[in-house]
Amino acid sequence: MRVAVCVCHGFETSPSHLRAHIIFGDTQGHKLKQEKPMASNQIGPVARAWYKWKALRLPWRKRFLVGYDLQGNTYWEFRLTRGAESNERWRRIVKYPRSTHYSSVKVSPQWHQWLRHTREDPPSIEEQHSDVLRRVRMQKLAAEADARWEAKPRVMEAPQAAPAPLLSPATARPLQQDAESSEQTDTVSKKIKEDAEKKDDPWAKAKARAPGETWQPTAWIPTAAKKR
């Protein structure tokens, strides 16, 4: 069995120190993911009997089984000295299966609190199952809330205009004739306005009366010299 250790006085020496560091580095910012929990009814009678035997606090033992989680990890308490009269504080560790890679080890928040001595009693199997169901329900509610939020119109987005209905040929012809007649009217009115501006322009009259306004300089062409 591989061992990852979390104790109040420190970590065990390498490689357990590295393993414990990996475990608690992964679990402190842990995300909700789909898990494949190990149900309690999947534990065979031999393993169940072995767990009960290891949980007995016999006086010659230095290590006792406290419980296990839904991923198959087992949690233990131990002391370096034997005997009930010892004043040494109990240390807490977690063991995970050999087939589990270091980066794949996951410790639930309840067991994480127990390992750090912030929780006195270890979590039960029923509590761990209810926590998994709670997280699944929270994921579902969060997905539904995100879907409702995406369905709402954005404040910065302009409202989409409704598409114009298609017109029949009988209705489109009068509209086209009205458009052509309005264009002709605009052209005539624009021409009349330009003519009126030309007639009423006082500067044009002043320029026409001045004698030098129309004069333009020409290129100089020298004449041939007369013969003497």
Image: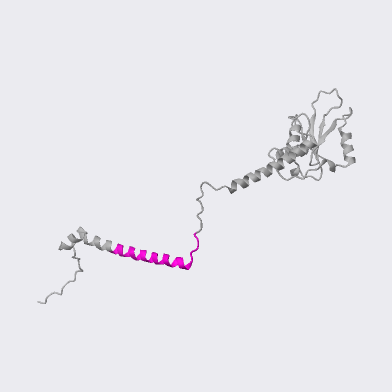
Tally of marks = 0
Rendering quarter of residue 193: bottom left
Q: Residue furthest left?
A: 228
In reply to whether residue 102 is colored magenta, the answer given is no
The secondary structure that most of the magenta stretch takes on is helix
Magenta part of the chain: 164-191
Rendering quarter of residue 121: top right
Q: Residue at x 40, y 67 (%)?
A: 177
Q: Residue at x 46, y 68 (%)?
A: 170
Residue 134 in view (yes/no): yes
Q: Position of 66 compared to 172: left or right?
A: right
Q: Estimate the x, y position of residue 116 in percent, counting from the top left.
A: 74, 31
Q: Position of 209 compared to 18: left or right?
A: left
| Quadrant showing the C terminus | bottom left
Q: Position of 219 compared to 164: left or right?
A: left
Rendering quarter of residue 124: top right
